[in-house]
Amino acid sequence: MPNVEKTPRQTIRVERALWDKAGQAVGTKNRGAVIRDFLRWLTHETDELPQRPAVPERDLSPVRNESAGQS
């Protein structure tokens, strides 16, 4: 059969701002992969959480920036 997807499509509701922010963090084409990885962790298929991207510099508060630079 043509155009048959390997996995069925699921629908979730996510606030637009959160969806956009996730796309900025992992790339707009990688959101689904990260969600699937999280669901595998959630259902105990794996013990490894998906890799969390670094916090963008613009989102760091001055207090966090100062403490991050100290060792």
Image (cartoon, grey):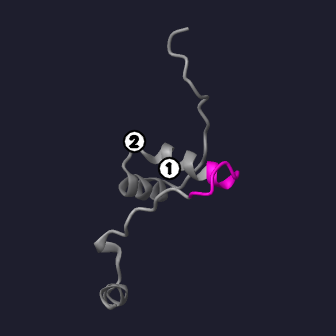
Outermost residue toward the top?
1
Q: What residue type is labelled 2?
A: Lys
Q: Do the residues labelled 2 and 1 touch (CB within 8 Å)?
A: no
Magenta residues: mostly which secondary structure? loop
Location of mark 1 (residue): 34
Q: Which amino acid does label 1 sit on?
A: Val
Image quarter where the C terminus lies is bottom left
Residue 29 numbered mark, or none: 2
Residue 31 picture location, percent across and down: 46, 47
Q: Which of 11 and 50 is in front in this view?
A: 50
Badge nearest the viewer, 2 or 1: 1
Q: Give the range drawn in magenta.
A: 40-48
Which of marks 1 and 2 precedes in the sequence?
Answer: 2
Compared with residue 52, is residue 65 higher up or lower down, i.e. above or below? below
Q: Residue at x 47, y 53 (%)?
A: 19
Residue 38 on image: x %, y %: 58, 53
Residue at 37%, 70% in the rendered image: 55
Q: Which of the pair 63/12 is nearer the observer?
A: 63
